[in-house]
Structure formats: structure tokens, C-alpha cells
Amino acid sequence: MAKSQQTFSKSEKEKKRIKKRELKAKKKEERKANAVKGGKLEDMLAYVDQYGRITDTPPDPEDKIVVDAEDIVLGVPRREDYEAEDPTKQGKVSFFDDSKGFGFILNTVTQEKHFVHVSGLIDEIKENDNVSFELEKGLRGMNAVKVKKV
């Protein structure tokens, strides 16, 4: 007679598989037994309060705000609604190297340093000169352009 092809590890795996299947069926039966059928609609509703949080209590009708549909503006506001900001800024040259052709300008209002290249100069500048300039987006941040002595 031939030996059984069932090894110890195969039989252990089969036992675990059967036990897992039984546990799953048992949990399914428990969920069915504990399920609440035909719950009330009021128990299933959720409300959002004025702060955007989900609650189970309905909002107070006295706190209701009436909004006229004509007052709602869709889209981006027109450009003329904004105040035109002066693009020229005031600053002081904190460092400038003539041989390399670059330096830095310290904005007097925001105390930020901005890179300046010799190609962005209108007048010749030296360190500690008061200047006016405009900002332009560069590769590594904002660069000062159209730099003039004040």
C-alpha cells in the first residue's frame, strides 16, 4: 500500500483554512443577529452646522441667514476693482561686485534681499546707494530690475 501524500504541514494549513472559514461564518451570523432593521429616518439623518461640522441635531431655524440669489457673484472680480499697486520699490544696495556683475538690494519696507544683475541696471550703482527698482520673477526667486539711483 502507498503512503499518504498528505504531509504534516499540508494538514496544518488545511486545519487553519477550515478554522478561518468557520470564524468568518460565525462573525457573519453575529452581524446578522445584531443588525438593526428598519431604523428611523431621524436616526439616519446628519446635519452640518455653521462651522462645517457634522452633527445629529438639526440647525436652529432662528440662525438661518437669507441670501438673495442676485447678490451672489460668480467668477473672478474685475481688474478695476483692485487698487493699483505701485510696482517701484525703494531699497539700499547691500552688496554689489562690479567685476562679477551682480549684487543684492535690501528692500527698505520689507527688509528682504533681492538679487540684481548688471543687465537689470539703468544707472551705475555702488554699495550703500539708495535705489528704486521693480521686481521680476527669476529662476531662484524675485530679481530686481530697472534699478535707478535715487
Image (cartoon, helix red, strand yellow):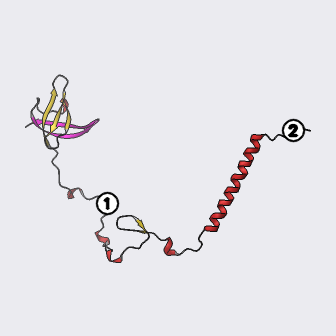
Q: Is residue 108 above or below residue 20?
A: above
Q: Which residue reaches farthest right?
A: 1
**In terms of image quadrants, where is residue 9?**
top right
The residue that label 2 is drawn on is 3
Out of 6 and 120, give the one closest to the viewer: 6
**In terms of image quadrants, where is residue 54?**
bottom left
Out of 121 and 92, give the one closest to the viewer: 92
Q: Which residue reaches farthest bottom?
A: 62
Taking the image as shown, residue 117 lies to the left or right of residue 53, namely: left
| Magenta span of residues | 130-148
Residue at mark 2 to residue at mark 1: CA–CA distance: 81 Å
**Dot 1 lies on which element?**
loop
Q: Main secondary structure of the magenta part?
A: strand
The residue that label 1 is drawn on is 75
Q: Is residue 10 above or below residue 67?
A: above
Please say whether residue 28 is one of the residues in the magenta stretch: no
Residue at position x 20%, y 36% from top? 114
Residue at position x 23%, y 40% from top? 136
The tag earlier along the polypeptide, 2 or 1, is 2
